[in-house]
Structure formats: C-alpha cells, structure tokens
Image (spheres, rainbow, N blue to C red):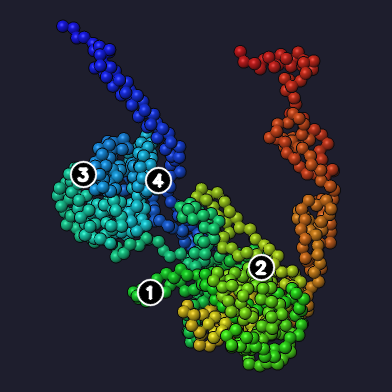
Amino acid sequence: MKRQKPDKSSPKGKWFSWFVVGCFIGYLLAMLAAYAVVSHLGKDLPNLDNIANLRFGQLTHIYSADGVTLGTVISVYRKWVPLEKIPKPLQWATIVAEDRKFYTHPGIDPKGIVRAIWECLKARRYVQGGSTITMQLARNLYLSSEKTIRRKLKELLLAVQLERRFSKDELLELYLNTVCYGHGAYGVQAAAELYFGKDVSQLTLPQASLLASLPKRPSDLSPFVNPEAAKRRRDYILEAMAEEGYITRKEAEEAKKIPITQGLRPEPKWLTKPPKALHFVEFVKRELVRRFGQDIVDRGGLKVYTTINYDLQKEVERIAERYLRAYRFTGADQMAFVVIHIPTGKILAMYGGRPYRIDPNTGKRRLDHFNRAVQAYRQPGSSFKPYVYAAALEIGFRPNSIFSDSPISFPQGNGKWWSPKNYDGRYGRKMTLKTALATSNNVIAVKLIRAVGVDKTVEVANRLGVKFPSHANPNVASYSLALGSIGITVLDHTAALASVANGGMKVNPTGINRVYDNEGNLIYVSKPEQQQVLMPEIASQLLTMLIATVTEGTGRRAQIRGYQVGGKTGTSENIKDVWFVGFTPTIACGVWLGRDDNKPLRTGSGGTLCAPIFREIVTATIKRYPSERTFSLLDNKRSHDGSEQVEKKFVRAVICSGSGLLATKFCPLTQVEYLPSNKVPRQRCSIHREKLLPVLICTASGKLATPNCPVQAVVTKALQRSQIPKEACDLHSPSVSDLPPEERTNEETEETRDEQPY
C-alpha cells in the first residue's frame, strides 16, 4: 500500500513544517554566531608565518669595551635544544602526563574538554581546563593565563592554526623548550641544569619522569618544596608510561624504587656565574631598561658593549680591597668610586662596594647588589662647597674676595643656636675665597651661602647634575647645606665637578658604548650629551681654586707627579662619610669611604683617607687612557705643579657648525662658543661664502632636474651659485605619448607600434 504524504493543511503537517523551518533557521543562526565569534576573536590573533615571532626569550649579553663578557640579563633561564637531543623517555613521559592523544587529535580533544567541563560543574569552580599540549603551547607563546571564556576560545583557534602550520614533532619540540618547570627554568635543558646539574641528554628514566611531572603545578610539585608530592606524581607518570607501552612494567617498578632526591642538587640554582664588575653591570641594566624597555632587555637578545675597560676595572678593584684592609683600624667597611672620561662622559671603572656580604642568619656569603656609587645618598661634607663657591662667583664674587672666619651663630627655632666650627679650631682670620676653599674653612662657607642664598646654591648644584634624595627638600635646608648636610651620590657628585674641568660643559655620564640587536644590527651608539652649565669664565675661576686645594690645601695627598689635579676633600659630621672628588684635565674620579650601618669612623678625613685612593686609581687609569697634563682653561706660568696660574681671557665667537671656522652670514648652522683668545679660529668659513640657493637636482645625472625626471630621482639641494650645474638632465626625455601630435614623427609612431604586444 502506498504511503501517503502528511497533509500540510492538517495541524500535524503544519507543526512538522514549522519544525523543519525552525531547525534550519536555528542552524543558520548558530553558524552565523560561530562565524561572528571566530571573526571577532581572530582579529587580534598573532601571525604564525614566522617562528621567530614567537615569544622565545633570548639572553642579553653585556661586554666590556675591550671585549670581555661581563654578564647577562636573565629574567628567565632558557636554553634551546632540538628534539633529537631530548631523550625519548622524557618525550614519552611528557605525552602521558599532559596529552595521551597528542599524535591523533587535531589540536583539541573534545572528550577532554567535555570531561573538564563536567569536573568544573561538579566542583562549582574552575578545576580543569582540558588543554592539549598544542593548546598549552598556544597559551604559553601568545596568550595570558587568565581563566576566561574569551581566552579559552582564542586558545582553541590558535591550537588549530598551530596544528595546520607545524608537524607534531615540531609542536612537541616547541612545547618542551618553552614550558615552565618551576624556579624560573623554562625548557627541558634549563630544567635539567637547574634540578640535576647536567645536560638534558644525560637524564635517567626517573629523572625524566620527575621533570615531566612539573609543568602541571611547578610550585606545588617541586622536589625542593614538596618531595612527597613530587614522588607521587613521578610514580603515577611511570605507571602511565607502562600502561601506554612506552616502557615495560619491570622498568617502571625499578624506576619507582629510586629516591626522589637521587641526583638532585642541594638547592635550585641556575648554572650562571655572577657577572664581572657586578655593580657596573647592574647600573648598565637599569640604563638599558630606560632606553629600550624591560621586555626588550629581558628577552631581546641584545649585544651591549659598555664603556669600562675590564683590565682597569680589575686593577682598581684590587686597589679598593687593599685599602679597605689597610683602613680596618678606622672601622670603615665599604668604599665606592667611579672613574669618568671627562670629554665623553664614559664611565671607565665603577666600584659599588664589596660584591659579597655575609648573611647574618645563615652565615653564608651572598651577592650584594646594592650599588653604593649610584644608589647610596651619603653626606658629602665639605666636598659640597664648590657648588656654594660657584654660586658666589656667578653673582659677582671673585677668588680674591676677602672674608673673615670670625665666629657666627644662627638660631635653630627651638631655643638653641647652631655655630659652625672650623676643623682646626681657629677663628678671626681674614683670607681670600681661594684660600678658604683650599683650606676647607667651614665658617666662611656658611657666611658665603648666607650671602648667596640657599635657593641659588641648590639651583647651581642641580644645574651641574646633583640630585638630592626624594625625601629631602634642600630649598628649606639651613645654612648647614654649605657643609654637605644632605646626601648625594658618588656618580652625580663626580660628574658635576668634572664639568669644572671641562670649561663649564657638563657631559652626562654613560656606561654604554653601542648596542646590537639579536640579528647583529647596530641599534644604538652613545654620543656625548653635553650642556653648558657654567660660563667658561666662572669655570676657570673655580678651577684655579680647586687646583689650589690640591697644591696647597687639604687635598695635597691627591697630587700626581707631572699632572695638574683639581679636587675637593669632604668629611661629614662625626666622620660618618669621607670623600675626595677630583680630576685631571681628562679623567675625573670620586671616592667615598664609610660604613654601611652609617656609624662614625674612629678617625680620618677625606684628605688623609680618600685622597691617596684617588691618586692610585687615577694613576692606573692614565696608564691606559693618557691624559693631558695641564688644563686648557689656564695659562701656566710654571711647571705642572699648579703653583701659579692666571686665567685666560675668553672671547665670544660665532662658529660655523660645518667647517669649525668663524661663521659668515651665509653659514646655515652656527653655534656660539666662549673660547680662550688663543683658541679662536683666525679664518672665516671657506665653505659658505655665498648665499645658498635651493636647486632641484636629478640624482641619476647630477644635473638640473627637468619635468621629465622621475619624482623619486629628484632632490632639493642648497648650493652656492658657483656650484649650481649649468646643464639640464639629458637622461630622462619625454615619452612619445607626452608629445603633441604634430611633433610625433612617423619613425616614432612605428617604433611605438612595434612595442605593442600582438
């Protein structure tokens, strides 16, 4: 009997029709929704075309100026190894621990995802993710670890893309080299070194199983933190490997008997040596971060060539340790200094203190990363006085101005009075400012800052490069600021006073010469950052006063035979800090000595303790960086002992930036310089004798450009009238189509026709 079709006019037939239409519409809506979600999430998915775009951290290497490797910048420890060098037991253990269907699924495991959703529903919280190895790889390389539906959907899409782009072995190699194994170790090679101190190829079966157990929860399953949990997880993986047929049951049972601590290192430790010149390397790291950002420095694989000479660095470190041992009787336990090349601002050596300290709790020796040359704000004592004197010279005082050191007192506001004391206890003398600075007279320094003003002194110190600690407000400080009552750093203090030897030109100190990216491209070259902070006349006057400090004042122990030396001693209240900051014509060096606990020294001063250290450090530096013997700012009547100097007369000169000669009215770029009279150029600029005219030049012919020359070949040059080409470009003639019909010849028409394709 023939089956009848349902009557569409009946209620049952209508219901069936609407059901079919509803299913079709629902299917379309579901497909559109899925397409919209995939399109929206796919907008910001990363490009997988180039594997170099993946987030593989590379070490930044730091070298000395003479090519010695000083250290590396390392936020995570990772070493890449190809899959063929990773032992099979470790590959098998990883697969059974993380994704048993790795070689059969297309990047996602639907059953695993459903199972994970069911477990989360039962626990009413997020407990499982159902992620395959490919999904974990996508998350590790491109995504964050936030537990959101949006991130999970992106993870699924990326996993499918990765499976289409790479083979299973390539994906496994990527995973084993990028996954975290705890304690900052990423990748199996780093983990093998961290936990067992060996190459990954030398791992035994129990060790491979232990490493494979860690990515699930690295911090909870670490054998250093929870050995019992680590053993349970390791034994579970060994059992799973036997079930899957990767190893025999006997091999699994034998491996389970091995103690979890067998072959394990005493503590997690990367196999990297502490950097040479520890504190300088830390300083360079901070400078790199300021210029390039933390992520580029941590992961960019930069090659950084610094300014220090490592041979010099080793010698000055030995000098520091020798003096610290010799000065034990004073109670001093730390020292800091920097050596700067004045014309370029390059740091040639840096010592931030003893690189190791003894941990009081464990008694073990620990690296001490605190850089006392850069991070410690210590009271400069009388070595701060040059800023007071510079301010005084700027408002009209002269080195031969007379002051009296008669006693003086100031109310403190609490009913008490403060009276500055001279170091020698003598008062009532009249002397020039030059003598007062050379002998470090405290009373006259206080009287001088009262005459100049604290605000003016702070402004001059800031202009020269001195930065005060954030918690201090020097503008409301008392006149004790003249005696160095507010802390500053060794680096700032040294660079600031070095500008006095440089004609008032401050050059910002730097520890970096040049930087290359991970492909060897030069991306940064250091150039001197200069700023005129003192008028040359003022710098010359202050220089004569600082030279007198070394030749006839408190800094006599800093004298270097055959060289002019300027500088200033400093001793803070109660001898908590002692200083000497000085310079030759091209080398500046600042030395600080004291205690980390800020307790007073038993005896000593900047002149007796720090000046001899300065002399030895600068002498060692001059051997490698020959220095001028006399200051170009001064005419010297006698030998190089600096006993008599007279100031040179400075002349304002307008210099052409292109030729270095006296500028003409036609020079396009000029600069005003204050030069000694015998240094002013005698000739006018020979390059710019005429007014420059803008001319269009064809780069192909070197002649005047015509309308027929291609736009990309035409440049505008500013030339003197005599340099302008006389002929027009003859390389670029007009095309036939550009000519009017009456100028087109038959020959040209035939030639043009021959060029047309058949």
Discs 4, 2 touching: Cβ within 8 Å: no
At x 38% / y 74%, what residue is drawn? 359
Q: Is residue 559 left or right of residue 279?
A: right
Callout 1: SS:
loop
- The percent position of residue 583, horizontal first and vertical second, equals 65, 74
Q: Residues within 10 Å of mark 1 (few under 14, many from 20)?
A: few
Q: Number of marks in the image?
A: 4
- The alpha-carbon separation of the residues under discs 1 and 2 comes to 40 Å
Closer to the chain start, of discs 4 and 2, is 4
The residue type indicated by label 1 comes to: Asp
Q: Which residue is mark 3?
A: 246
Q: Quadrant of residue 268?
A: bottom left
Number of the front mark, 4 or 3:
4
Q: Which residue is mark 2?
A: 463
- The alpha-carbon separation of the residues under discs 4 and 3 comes to 32 Å
Quadrant of the snapshot with the C terminus: top right
- The alpha-carbon separation of the residues under discs 3 and 1 comes to 48 Å
Quadrant of the snapshot with the N terminus: top left
